Every structure is written in C-alpha cells, then in structure tokens.
Image: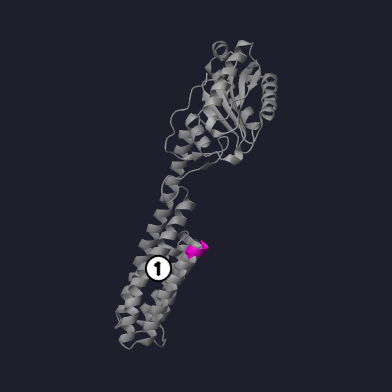
Amino acid sequence: MARALIGRPSAPVMRAAGHGAQVTQMEFGRSPRDIEHSRRTFLVALFAMSGSAFLVPLGLYSLLDGRMVLGLILLGNALFCLSLMFYSRVSGRVTGVSYAFAIQAGLLALFLALQGGIGGSGVYFSFALAMMMVMAGFTGMVSGLLICLGFLGILVAGLYGPWPGVYAYPDHHPSRIVMGFVALFIMSLIAEWIRTRSYSAISHATERLSVDAYHDPLTGLLNRRGLEEALASLDDAELPAAVAIMDIDHFKRINDAHGHEAGDVVLKDLSGILMNNVKGKDLVCRWGGEEFLLLFTQTALHGAGSVMEKLRDEVAARPVRHGVQAFSITFSAGLVDLPTKGVFLTALGRADELLYQAKQEGRNRVLSGRVTSS
C-alpha cells in the first residue's frame, strides 16, 4: 500500500500529469532559448559598461587633441551604449537591443578602421568591436556569414576606393587589415557555432536526464520524485483537489498466469487509460508496483468520484491483449478530498486505508472519504 513521501530534494519542478516541465537549474536557464536570452542580457550589460569605459576617455582625449568629429562620435557612441542598456532593462527587449549593439559595434569598427582614429591607431580598437558585432548579432552560421561578408565588403571598398576621409595607410597595410579581419571572423564564427551547438546538446541531454529522473521508464508517468516536485509547485488556484490511490486487483495472479511481459502490458494499458481521463494540471503517478496515485486538481470529491467510477467501468470492460491472450482486469481504489496542500500526507494515509477496505470488501470498487483540514 501507499507509503509516506520522502523529503523533498532540491531539483527541477515537474508539472501536469507527467506532461511539460518548468525547470530552473542554473542562473543562465535550461533551454537554448533561456540560455541565449541570459547570454544576450549579459552581453548588453558588458558591452555598455566596458564600451563606455573605453569610449568616454578616448572621446575626451580626442576633443582635447583637437579632433572634434572623432571625439563627438566616440562620446555619442558611449551615450548610445548606456541608453541601449537602460532601454533593455526597462522594456525587457534584450534580443532587439543586442542586435542594435551589433549594428553599432559594426559601424563604429568600420569608422575607426577607415578613418584611422588618432594616427591610424583606430584600427586596433576596431578588431574588438568587430568581434562584439559577431557575438551580439550571431543567430546562426548563415546570419553570421552575412554579417561578416557585409562588413568585409564595406571595409574593402573603403580601403581600396577613392573615398575622402579614409586614413592613408601605408601600401601594404590595407591587405593586412583585411586579412586580420578575415581571420578574426573565421575564428569568431567557429566559436559562436560551437557555442550554440553545445548549448543545444547540453540542454537536450539535461532534458533527457530530467525525464528519466522524474518519470517511470515503463509507463512514462511521474514517479514518486516527480510527484513530489509537482506537488511542491501546486498553488492555491488548483485547490480544492482530490487524491486517489488505486491498486490492480490480483496483479500477482496475472504475472503468474500470463507472464511478467503481460504484467507490463497491463501496467502500460492502464497508464494510457488514466492519462486519457485526466485534464490540465491533474497528476498521474506510478506509485510503486501495481499502485497508481491520481490527483484531480480543481475538483470536488463527488466529481473525482464520478471520474473514478468511469475509470473503473472502462478498465473492467476493456480486455488486455498480449499476443494471442486476452484477459480482463479490475482495480480497487481509495479516494479522499484534498482541501489544502498541508494535509496531503493525511489524505494519502486516509486514501490508503480506504483502498485496503475496498480490497477487504471484495475488490473492483472505489471507496471515498474525507479528511479534516489542519
């Protein structure tokens, strides 16, 4: 019969009759989407703070050196960085802001590479900005390639075209600058591609491990650990509820007469019937062996009783087929109300008592009772 729940582990939260999961295992999230959102949030803050820390002194130095246009552009970019960060915090639109950062970083990198900054030194800073452009704008290898090719096209046209305002680098420098950017982009694209693929692989592996840890491998239902976490996430909106403990009648005889494989078929068939008769955030758990636990959310005792009687009739009327064999099964159950989460263990004990009573009275029946809220 049912036994008390063990202590809650600090583990992910599972919801809704074995379907769906809400998990928070680490600060950067669990799914690729969560991880990417957190990464972009971090990049926005990093680029804004570090960018301003460099651009403001360089802008002021340029103004003092008499380079008014350069100084105003650098200071304007610093202000733009901080404005983007503030906007992302207020609006929550981190993805769009990171793309704006990518555009800003790319344009500023092109400006410094072509205009030269102070004595041609601007090109050195443009490499870091170009890498930031790739990191903030990368969504996939195709998008990354387009960003880099567009940047290189403008850079080559600017360095080798007859444009006013372009810094007069020594003859052999433009080709080296272009090759430097090509090498930087190749390494950046490879690194970003590996990063995104690694996130996806890790998240999928984590999801698989989570499913294995919180679900019964034979039936796919929640196991006890999964039920504990689902109960921990249950809120007041799901109450009142009802809890049922059910047990397949004469399950040992089925195994002895038809074999353990037939017993597994019984468990899987019954699990399928149970899942087809629950709704929304109802919980279905393989409690152990041939025992199952059902928790009907937002359901009064009489409503849960109707569902259990429907289940009892459906299970008894539906033959189990295993190879050429066909046989019928029944179950006995104890059902109680659950007015609050705080009386769950009490409700579980009372349901177990009613299950035992149903067995004693001849099996193939559902007995209902109530618990007192404490």
Find the magenta span and give its range.
Answer: 88-92
Q: Position of residue 202 (x, y in %)?
A: 42, 46
Left or right: 182 as drawn, with respect to 17: left
Q: Nearer the viewer, residue 332 or 335?
A: 335
Nearer the observer, 290 or 209? 290
- Report the residue at 52% width, 39% height from top: 233
Examine the rendering and report whether any part of residue 18 can be seen: yes
Look at mark 1 in the image and give the residue it sits on.
48
Residue found 61% across the figure and 20% down from its top: 333
The one nearer the camera, 74 or 245, is 245
Residue at image coords 34%, 87%: 67
Q: Which residue is drawn at 32% across and 89% down?
A: 66
* Overall secondary structure of the magenta section: helix
Q: Does the magenta stretch include residue 89?
A: yes
In the rendered image, residue 243, in percent from the top left (x then y), is placed at 59, 28
Q: In the displayed structure, would residue 334 be above or below residue 59?
A: above
What is the x, y in percent for residue 330?
A: 64, 17
The residue carrying pointer 1 sits among few (fewer than 14), some (14 to 19) or many (20 or more) residues within 10 Å by Cα, namely: many
Q: In this view, does 106 lie to the left or right of 293?
A: left
